[in-house]
Amino acid sequence: MGRDLIVEILRHLTVANIPSVRSAEAAFSTLDEVPVDLILLSWDRNDPFDALAFSRELRKLEDERLRRLPVILLTGSLTREHVISGRDAGMDEFLTKPVSPIALRQRLEMVIETPRPFIDSSIFLGPCRRRKNPADYYGEKRRQIDRPIMIDQDEVARRSPIRLALTEIRETCAGLKAGHSPQVAKALSQINAAKALAIDQGDQALKAGLASFETYVGIAAPLGQADEPVISAALSALEQLAALPPAFADARETVSLALGQIIQKKNTA
């Protein structure tokens, strides 16, 4: 679901010719055969693909154009340690899943329109590791107030009411496995409140997804049978629905369908 979803978002952003591979070997082979302008690396917990190792190997390639390709890491668990390790491995930018089309477009514009200087030294290969892009600087002692303000759209999206509500639900659901009644009641109340937000927004897909999740929690949690992987996958799908605007109807249908299949499979097991 994740790979197809990213491709769908890129197509809406008028990005053409999007090769997709599942291994480092296939990626390097594709780079030799297909003209590529930038690389999106999708990495998640327990993923066998080593994004850091791939980025380090990319920066060591003899082909000057390939070794300088912009690299954006997409991950569901972005921490300060991940950012530091990624920058040391030669990555340009980072984006947290669920992917917001606006945030993805911002990252694409950053690496294409204001790329960082490429450092080629004995101790580091890759874009300059300073977070502030030198391309945003316009003079020897340019005042900070005179520089253009870059608003992180990914952070803005995470602070929307529905995303904050889903974050609260995720935190509450972390303790559902024990079947503790107050915790179950709290989760169901939060899901119902999120559903009200979806209704206010006229978001039928998110409302339906929350209703399905509410059914699962209401049945499985009181019996102590709430499955953590199912809850995590369902919440990830709900968060992705919240991040995708109505214009991405096909992508939203893909996410909604996958969520429905997860819930139906568990409810009929």
Image (spheres, rainbow, N blue to C red):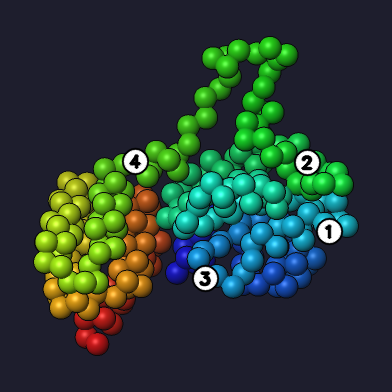
Q: Position of residue 186 (x, y in %)?
A: 14, 57
| Residue at the disc numbered 2 | 118
Label 4 SS: loop
Residue 164 against residue 57 in the figure, above or below: above
Tell whether 181 sits left or right of 230: left
Residue located at (34% from left, 56% from top) = 239
Residue 253 in which image quadrant? bottom left
Q: Position of residue 155 (x, y in %)?
A: 43, 40
Q: Are marks 3 and 1 in contact (CB under 8 Å)?
A: no
Whether 187 is drawn above or below 90: the answer is below
At 13% from the left edge and 73% from the top edge, which residue is drawn? 222
Of label 4 and label 1, which has the lower sequence position? 1
Displayed quadrant of residue 116: top right
Name the quadrant containing residue 189.
bottom left
Q: In the rendered structure, which amino acid carries the disc numbered 3?
A: Asn
Q: Badge 3 is on which residue?
A: 46
Whole-angstrom CA distance, mark 2 to mark 1, is: 14 Å
Task: Mark 2 or mark 4: name the one nearer the start of the chain.
Answer: 2
* Residue 163 % position (x, y): 31, 48
Q: Viewed as shown, does residue 50 lie left or right of 244?
A: right
Name the quarter where the C terminus is drawn. bottom left
Residue bearing the label numbered 1: 61
Q: CA distance from mark 2 to mark 4?
A: 33 Å
Q: CA distance from mark 2 to mark 3?
A: 31 Å
Q: Amino acid at mark 4?
A: Arg
Q: Residue flagged by tag 2: what amino acid is it?
A: Phe
Residue at 56% across, 61% down: 42
Label 1 neighbour load within 10 Å: few <14, some 14-19, many 20+:
few
In the rendered structure, find residue 265 and report the number of the disc placed on it.
none
In this orientation, does residue 252 appear?
no
Badge 3: residue crowd in 10 Å (few <14, some 14–19, many ≥20): few
Apparent side of residue 254 relative to residue 221 in the rendered image (left or right): right
